[in-house]
Image: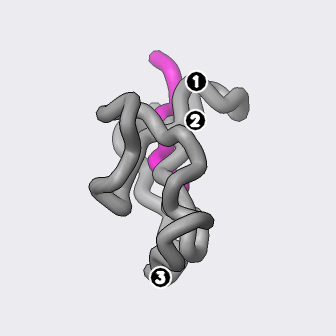
Amino acid sequence: MARVEIKCNENGPELVVVDGKVFAAMCRCGASNSKPYCDGTHAKIGFKAEAKDIVVVEQ
């Protein structure tokens, strides 16, 4: 089974990491023009949020 993690970067996107490799960068600021994916808009609008890691599946 794959190890899946969501890494919420400080002031940035949520990275979906599968078996140690970044699979996708997801928007969490709500301002991306390519939702649900991050397009870097968080940096332009001054988005602020703390970092956090979440393990979704681990076996």
Given the image, on which type of amino acid does mark 1 rest?
A: Phe
Mark 3 and mark 2: Cα distance apart in space? 22 Å
The residue where tag 1 is placed is 23
Where does the image place residue 6, in percent across and percent down from the top left?
46, 48
User: How many neighbours does mark 1 have within 10 angstroms: few (below 14), some (14-19), or many (20 or more)?
Assistant: few
| Disc 2 + disc 1, Cβ < 8 Å | yes
Residue at 49 percent across and 44 percent down: it is 5
Residue at 51 percent across and 62 percent down: it is 42
Where does the image place residue 30, in percent across and percent down from the top left?
28, 55
State which quadrant residue 12 falls in.
Answer: bottom right
Mark 1 and mark 3: Cα distance apart in space? 23 Å
The residue where tag 3 is placed is 48
The residue where tag 2 is placed is 17
Given the image, on which type of amino acid does mark 3 rest?
A: Lys
Going by the picture, which residue comes out furthest to the top? 1
Going by the picture, which residue comes out furthest to the right? 21
Where does the image place residue 46, in percent across and percent down from the top left?
52, 78
State the SS at label 2: strand
Mark 2 and mark 1: Cα distance apart in space? 5 Å
Residue at 39 percent across and 29 percent down: it is 34
- Disc nearer the start of the sequence (2/1): 2
| Disc 1 + disc 3, Cβ < 8 Å | no
- In the displayed structure, 26 sits above or below 18; it is below
For this rendering, which residue is in front, 14 or 21? 14
For this rendering, which residue is in front, 19 or 40? 40
Q: Nearer the viewer, mark 1 or mark 3?
A: 3
Please report the bounds of the magenta region as a residue range.
1-7
Given the image, on which type of amino acid does mark 2 rest?
A: Val
